[in-house]
Amino acid sequence: MLAEIFLVARKDLRVERRAKIALGQVAPLALLILMVFAFALDANTSLLERGAGGLYWLAVLYGGTLLIQRSFDVETDDGNMDALRMSAIGMPSLFLGKALALFVQITVLELILGPGILLLYNVGVVDWVLLIAAAIAGTVAFSVCGVLWGAMSAGLRVRATLLPLLLVPVLAPVLLAGSRAFETALGVRAGAGWTWAGLMFVIAAVHTALGLGAFGFLLEEG
Amino acid sequence: MPVANSGAKMTATLITRVLGVSALAATGLMAVLGLVISPPDVVQGEAVRMLYIHVPSIWIAYGGFALTSISSILFLRRSRRRPDQGRHYDRLAGSAAEVGVVFTAITLITGMLWGKVTWGTYWQWDARLTTTVLLFVTYLGYLALRRLPAEPAVRSRRAAVMALISFINVPIVHYSVDWWRTLHQKASLSVGRRPEITGEMYWTLLYSALAVTILATWLIIHRYRVIRLEELRDEEGLEALIASRLNKDFGSH
Amino acid sequence: MSAVVEFEGVVCVAGSFPVLTGLDLRVDRGEILHVQGENGAGKTSLLRACAGLISVSSGKASVLGFDMRVDRKAPRRHIGLLGHENNLYRDLEVSKHVEFRAASVGARASDTAAALEKVRFPQQLWSVPIGSLSAGQRRKVAIASLLVGRPQLWLLDEPHAALDTESRKNLDAILIEASASGATIIFVSHESPVTKEIASRVITMDGGRITEDSGAG
């Protein structure tokens, strides 16, 4: 099963390395969003500093949604899903493999957004360990939910609008927890940063369990 | 188009007519009890009457969504190998979710009105209000998924998975938002704790819950039958199509 | 002879449209079956039903000994399906794609070179992304991706489409060789002059059923 997971993840990352959608298009767009938040808040440094955590995760949500969409467009293009259905790859492996590839891509996106908020919003990190733990927890939760809901809307004509509609309510707790944990790590709010990070790990675990059981139902046709 | 089973043509039967009349009478009595007979609250005054529609509505909504999830599990179990099996569970899941969404909307509207009267604003970033909005949007998404133009078997299966995940997600959303901020008064009625409302108000609330339950049951049964009729219409089209394709073959020989 | 495909009164429904309307078919091991018929006759649906991609709503159906009404996923890994689409990742390099398909059916990735050589895919293009290939070259990559998995049952929908005369002959040779080594081949084609030579049996479909069968009686 581990071999199958890596097979799928490696394939997805190789496709991405060739097409350069995440680095070439999504990451610059997400950076741009950090800029326009500053326009919206009239470059009010104290507001931007306090909101940096939340704005970071909003930018991740926006960029991540595009990456999730892309991850499944690759599979529905040219009937590739048929070949996956006919293959010996188990549905749980496919689920974890695609989630792993998405995790890597969103991490790359965050490695660009992270310095972005530090520079643009003039914030400093007071707790690096919490910041990194929260980023990892949030990204895992994001990737796992993303693959699950990406499959839910895959191959439908209205997927571009359906995916965000289905995804945002599910990711709302991750957004909430990620923002609060980051605020603590960035020193703008004293609070239970670690508990919020823990909550994100719980959300990730619950959705992983759900995905392992339900993924096969989502990709079968007829 | 001729209908094979004329009994299936209608959505009403004797039982549901009785149920419908009961629902009408029960909600009428609920209005009288809630608006006239029960006393105004010491603190909240007349605004407390909102309680009798607000609280039962969210109970029914949660009940509806629970029913959706249970039916979805049963549907996935039945249709796992045979996609043509277990469709009644799929219909039940859909009708219960529709009724759940309607009652969630009622809860939200009455909640906001109540908030305007007691808090002075329509909207507070209160935990339960926020959770309820997320719940509302989640199940609107579920209904959107159910209505998509796609292969019915694929659509039903995806919808069932979504219903299941969404329901498991409800406590997570509730817990995280609750933790974020809590302004709302504690749950009005809960097991093991003395209710904060007593006497006539207490009995009126319990009665309202009963009346709303009858109404919701009646609505779910009718929605179920309408969905069944829509499927029947499609199936008859199917039989006619097979027949016409076969006739065409005979004609060509 | 053992039956690879055994269908009795099979009805398949897509949405609310009957695509197969009570189809009877038995295909034995090693046969090369040519399916013909007008557009919309149900040829593609027959292939997808054999592959277990669409479910059988009534009748009896077994493929490679698996009852399709019990578990239609079971025979899939032993089947090579090529539809209208080529099932190619356009951003992957040719050899990486074929290696992925090989690994995904549990075959050896080291067979990739042999498969690409067999379909006569020019070696200088092996590391080129599939998106930059011509239609005919893509079809060859798709065939190589099937070949590498050594399927017991080949289901091909217009396999000769986009191929030139030389490549068609080469594909026919590949199919004959596969059949000789025990594989069963069912293919859909409109181009009977080219393909009649290799087919051991021809069936004609209309209205979701078989109306003529050269192997019957």
Image: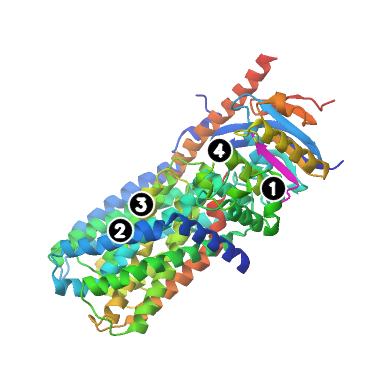
Mark in front: 3 vs 1: 1
Q: Position of residue B187 (x, y in %)?
A: 30, 72
Identify the residue position indicated by label 2 in the image: A29
State the mark number for residue B140: 3
Mark in front: 2 vs 1: 1
Amino acid found under the numbered disc labelled 2:
Leu
Crowd band around label 3 with a 10 angstrom C-alpha radius: few (<14), some (14–19), many (20+): some
Identify the residue position indicated by label 1 in the image: C117
Q: Is residue B170 above or below residue C125?
A: below
Q: Evaluate if marks 1 and 4 touch, with contact meaning CB atoms under 8 Å apart.
A: no
Q: Position of residue A88 (x, y in %)?
A: 66, 56
Crowd band around label 1 with a 10 angstrom C-alpha radius: few (<14), some (14–19), many (20+): few
Residue range in magenta is C149-158
Q: Evaluate if marks 2 and 1 touch, with contact meaning CB atoms under 8 Å apart.
A: no
> What secondary structure is found at the residue carrying circle 2?
helix
Q: CA distance from mark 3 to mark 1?
A: 54 Å
> What secondary structure is found at the residue carrying circle 3?
helix
Q: Is residue C157 magenta?
A: yes
Visible residue check, residue B175:
yes
Q: CA distance from mark 1 to mark 4?
A: 18 Å
Identify the residue position indicated by label 4 in the image: C135
